Image (tube, rainbow, N blue to C red):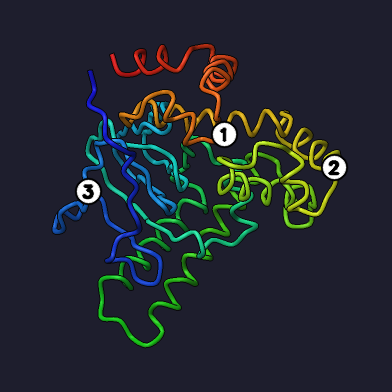
Amino acid sequence: MKSQQIDIIKFPISPLAKAGVLIKNMEDNSHAAEHDHSRPHRDDHYLLMIATSGHFVINIDFENNIITAPAMVLIFPGQIHHIVSAREPSGWGISIDQALIDKEFQIIMERGFHHSLSLDRQSAFYNHTVTLMGEMEKLQTTAANLYAVRATHSILDAFLGLLAGEIAAVNNHGKTKSNRGAIIEQSFMQLLKIHYKDWKQPARYASELNISVAHLYDTIKTITGDSVSVYIQQYCMLEAKRLLCFTKFTVKEIGYQLGYEEPVYFGKLFKKVTGLTPLQFRRQYLD
């Protein structure tokens, strides 16, 4: 049986980061890892891995992602993840403060970057990526001047723009910035991540967004295929899974933490969403 923690470990961005960004070369072993990447944990920032060679297995929220380079994978703030295996890795890992990512780019990545993205070594995007990452690494490792941080942010923004364009092209999302529905969806998701423990009713989110419940429902249903209520439940049950698998909290305690005062209701809702009772899910994952 896998050991459980008292609570889920959550790491802030490294103190080595300069103005919210840190790039690490996978082949550079001169610095010891600040934490054990093989143990499940989550971060309060984005983590982007760009693999130019090697083979990796990374577990993200209970799903093993098999990554064969060249490829990249994006881990969002709050996602439970750990490295299962890594063979002959090369490339970069980039920690990025949420505040540095343009809202439009966040919308595109939230909607379209949920699995690894395979890269073509012959493509312009791949070559731009390698060039920009190399320049960012040089800026970070060389003596800083007055505008080095600004230059790093500019390179990062340029890369994220290219990445957003690549994702949008693959997923046919098109004109996200002018899409009012996409803005509502992103705002709803941001509120959900903050208030999911206390706000269980769609009306609370609609009120905060200054739109009608019907408008919120139609928007989320059109974009995601799920109702607002279902989306709220699924997000809460994902957090419940995380707590069941990576903490020692009882089912009752987890229900309370997620805003469910009635343990029986919480158990029934969990089974409705996942097909298992909380204890069945915990045993299945840990045994």
Question: Percent from the top left, x then y, of residue 76?
Answer: 47, 46
N-terminal of the two: label 2 or label 3?
3
| Mark 1 and mark 3: Cα distance apart in space | 27 Å
Residue at 59% x, 29% y is: 234
Nearer the observer, 104 or 198: 198
- Residue farthest to the bottom, as pictured: 146
N-terminal of the two: label 1 or label 3?
3
Q: Locate residue 100 relative to residue 21 in the image: left or right.
A: right
Name the element at disc 2: helix
Question: Percent from the top left, x then y, of residue 283?
Answer: 34, 14
Residue at 70% x, 33% y is: 224
Residue depth check, mark 1 versus mark 3: number of the one nearer the observer: 1
Instruction: Please name the amino acid that badge 1 sits on.
Output: Tyr
Name the element at disc 1: helix
Residue at 42% x, 72% y is: 152
Q: Locate residue 231 relative to residue 62 in the image: left or right.
A: right
Q: Which residue is disc 3 drawn over?
A: 35
Instruction: Please name the amino acid that badge 3 sits on.
Output: His
N-terminal of the two: label 1 or label 2?
2
Question: Percent from the top left, x then y, of residue 97?
Answer: 44, 61
Q: Could you classify mark 3 by the number of other residues whose Cα lies within 10 Å: few (under 14), some (14-19), or many (20 or more)?
A: few
Q: Which residue is disc 2 drawn over?
A: 215
| Mark 1 and mark 2: Cα distance apart in space | 21 Å
Instruction: Please name the amino acid that badge 2 sits on.
Output: His
Q: Could you classify mark 1 by the number of other residues whose Cα lies within 10 Å: few (under 14), some (14-19), or many (20 or more)?
A: some
Nearer the observer, 114 or 195: 195
Q: Which residue is disc 1 drawn over?
A: 235
